[in-house]
Amino acid sequence: MQPKVRRSPDSSTTRKAASSSGYGYASIEKQRQRLPVYKYRTAILYLVESHPTTIVVGETGSGKTTQIPQYLKEAGWAEGGRVIACTQPRRLAVQAVASRVAEEMGVKLGEEVGYTIRFEDATNPGTTMINVVMVDEAHERSILTDIVLGLLKKIQCRRSDLRLIISSATTEAKSMSDFFQPSSRRYRGSESVEPGLKMEPAILSVEGRGFNVQIHYLEEPVSDYVRAAVSTVLLIHDKEPFGDILVFLTGEEAIEAAVKQLTDDIQDRKISSGLIVLPLYSGLPQAEQDLIFSPTPRGKRKVVISTNIAETSLTLEGVVYVIDSGFSKQQFYNSITDIENLVVAPISQASARQRAGRARRVRPGKCYRLYTEEYFLKEMAAHGIPEIQRSNLVSCVIQNQLFGHLRYSTLLRCLTTMQNLLRLLDFMLLKYPYSQ
Ligand SMILES: Nc1ncnc2c1ncn2[C@@H]1O[C@H](COP(=O)(O)OP(=O)(O)OP(=O)(O)O)[C@@H](O)[C@H]1O
């Protein structure tokens, strides 16, 4: 059965596109100047110059990620072998953003613009001294982002010349600003603070958005969102003009089920040829993940069925339609049972906006939410629970200790203690074996 879809009459996300000149092919420089963040270039540079910490709030697609590092580079913040670093919560986005920035700057990836992710380092070894750190997608509150923010706050006490930019898509800037307020403890024993530097964080709101996105909601809730997603893909393919489709489901199992259903339906109907169906989840080999970036052949339509790894910072040029199931897989830790589970849970309004934002990156788009508007407005949480509040922190603490703070001798002592503990456990198990 096809899910009933209706267009939201008063959705705030249906405002007119900021760019009136449509989406013809413009030079990269023109494209850069059309982005909402461009108007704030001078203000951003002034604030970074005069504050150790600047918080930039702007809608998805306003140009924060790709443009701010370039403005800093153009203003000389990368001179003398120094580095402008930008952190991302997801590796797929790291590679995609670095490639785009290298393309816009007309340089080879891995030289002036590089990236580093686990097991892969595409950076120039000559550049080591970090001058500015931009922490992107801070609103996502991923555990590593939160830890990076905590560490940077500590580092700033010793290096007041280090500039920090926190970029966020939500207006929760106040709590971030409170966290970075200078306290009496901060800057104690630091090098002398630059004259004229205003220690409190600056907040800048980047107004405006890229292109328009129409939001469609279901009239009735559906129980099987995989089936509903597949039906919506076919509906779009039958009725809507050209443009690729990005579907957000929960995990590998749901995605592979959707790929199979879609492939079967295409074969049954024999009319939907021209669809290229691509799954996307982190366990997929890199070469298969990279297929999502390949241009769609003329006369075909790409359907990318993804987890939330495509939710932020990613621009898939051909995507015009987004289908949002309203769910994602999230980690939850139960401290009583000491068990961590990956469970399918509803997403937040902030996530839903990020998902919709993938549909209007280079042209106007449409987003089909597989839930009702009432559910979105009245039941969906405004923001998700920060990962740090629902995870087991042991591995993070160990990682942090091993790489950040422990000296070799302390580490050795720690390992010896663990070894002794294991021996003791061994002994106890031998002495008091489990009763059947
Ligand atoms: N690979 C790309 N190909 C074409 N256009 C791109 C690409 N990457 C970025 N853009 C353009 O630049 C715009 C700004 O992207 P950017 O990632 O800087 O925005 P953002 O404000 O950081 O949003 P988000 O938080 O969603 O990442 C996009 O909306 C798109 O128009």
Image: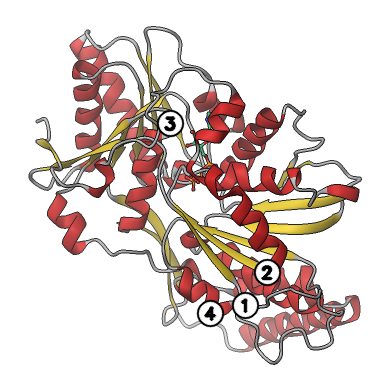
How far apart marks 1 and 2 lie (CA) works out to: 7 Å
Which numbered dot is residue 200?
1
Query: For the residue marked with disc 2, what is the amino acid?
Result: His
Spatial CA distance of label 1 from label 4 is: 9 Å
Q: CA distance from mark 4 to mark 3?
A: 41 Å
Is the C-beta of the residue carrying label 4 under 8 Å from the nearest atom of ligand 1?
no
Q: Tell me the distance, in whole angstroms, between the alpha carbons under discs 1 and 3.
A: 45 Å
Q: Circle 4 sits on which residue?
A: 178
Left or right for 54, reference 334: right
Residue 279's tag is: 3
Residue 347 visible in the current orientation? no
Q: Residue at x 64, y 74 (%)?
A: 150
Q: Which mark sits nearer the N-terminus, 4 or 3?
A: 4
Residue under the point 44% across and 47% down = 60
Residue type highlighted by circle 4:
Asp
Q: Is the Cβ of the residue at disc 1 closer than 8 Å to that at disc 2?
A: yes
